[in-house]
Amino acid sequence: MRIAVIGSGVAGLGAAWALSRQHEVILFEASARPGGHTNTVTVDAPDGPVGIDTGFIVHNPVNYPNLIRMLECLDVRTQPSRMSFALSAGQGALEFSGGGRLLGLFAQLRLLFSPAHWRMLRDILRFFRHTKGLLTTNQLPDSTLGEFLDAHGYSSEFQRRFLCPMAGAIWSMPASETRQFPFPAFARFFDSHGLLNVFRRPKWRTISGGSQRYVDAMLTDFAGELRLETTVTSIRRLDEGVEVTSEHSTEHFDAVVCAVHGDIAARLLADADEAEAAVLGQIRYAENRAVLHTDRKLMPRRKLTWSSWNVLQSADRLDNQAVCLSYWMNCLQALDTEEEYFVTLNPIREPDPKRVLYETVYTHPQYSPETMQAQARLPEIQGRRGIWWCGAWTGYGFHEDGFTSGLNAARALGATPPWENAGH
């Protein structure tokens, strides 16, 4: 078959890579580089060139099984990473960190004597026990996270200083909006990622030299044609096959795998029916500005609290501002450099322009009850008249979700990843 794959993020790469072993595959990418959120920037550091990830950074064997198999199949090296969380509010007026360090939890001596801080810590343990109990007994309420927290009297300190900022960091959304996240999905995600455990959390890893290494390896092994800077403008079903129109041409394909964001997919499909419009139209996105820099002003004031993930808030309250999150890349990627490097999403204050190395904008799915309803209906439209849909938006919005959805589209078209054929 002649198959078009639209979008070269992890979902499109996964689908195209698997399909190209058995079919003629054209991979369309609107931008000048493949990889989507896999975006490694090479910095000319005093110590020599260093690859720093600005999008996809870490994975673990428990929650990323297909990604791990692909990395092993293509001999892409990985190395241990460290994961920890810190919050800094009011320009450092309140700061603490987790990650199993008692000193970090009480980085400010006054927190030892703060009833609000102890209330937050007690509620962290209560939430962990409570949620795990509901999962064990299969009694998760059909409510939003906010409704659940309010119904069970969880303190405002726990919500605004810990749970909502952490969720906002995970899903790249305003902390206040995480309260609209469907609680059953939230609970299952936190449980599967070990986030309801004080100890026994997954061992995280990062790709040696930057995540671009796996994109390069996949494209080297890809047997089809990659067309960069080729924007697809419409997809239309014919009596036999599918017509794909780009800014350069109109072509006929036997099938199409659409691996772009849900809202873009909705605009591309020229002949969407009611079900397709309903599913694709309910996936909301938000833009997040990402800046690679060396400005320490966008980290907690106290270096004792510096963590892999650092949420910065203008005040000690929940608001609808885009989450400001600074990734400490030396920690996450084990960078052996004299300089400290950071990637900050939605900087709460502008970094020193002399210290800015790169910036871009990423778009992330935003989760609500409507999102889950759309996902539940996705099987209705898969493969309808020759089009399959994939992307991280079909799951929790993470790399494994995207990659797995791309492999599933390939399987539906009769192709399988190499490890399923070669006993990897």
Image (spheres, rainbow, N blue to C red):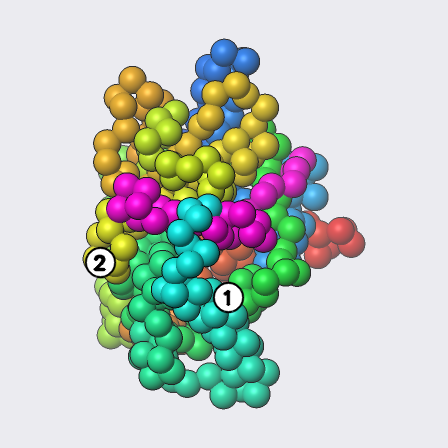
Disc 1 packing (10 Å; few <14; some 14–19; many ≥20): some
The picture quadrant where one finds residue 414 is bottom right
Query: In front here: 84 or 156?
Result: 156
Q: Pinpoint residue 77: horizontal percent, then vertical percent.
A: 67, 35
In the rendered view, tell whether residue 12 sits above or below residue 127: above
Which residue matches tag 2?
Answer: 319
Q: Where is residue 281 in the image (x, y as percent from the top left)?
A: 25, 65
**Residue 25: x %, y % from top left:** 49, 44
Report the residue at 47% width, 42% height from top: 305
Query: Residue at point 28% right, 28% down?
Result: 351
Residue shown at the point (59%, 62%) measured from the top left: 198
Query: What is the span of residues highlighted in magenta in the rendered image?
Result: 77-106
The type of residue carrying mark 1 is Phe
What residue is rendered at 27% in x and 55% in y? 316
Is residue 79 part of the magenta span, yes or no? Answer: yes
Q: Can residue 236 be seen in this view?
A: no
Given residues 340 and 2, the one toward you in this image is 340
Residue ID for mark 1: 190
Q: Nearer the viewer, residue 108 or 105?
A: 108
Q: Is residue 219 magenta?
A: no
Q: How crowded is mark 2: few (under 14 residues within 10 Å), some or many (20 or more)?
A: some
Give the CA distance from mark 2 to mark 1: 22 Å
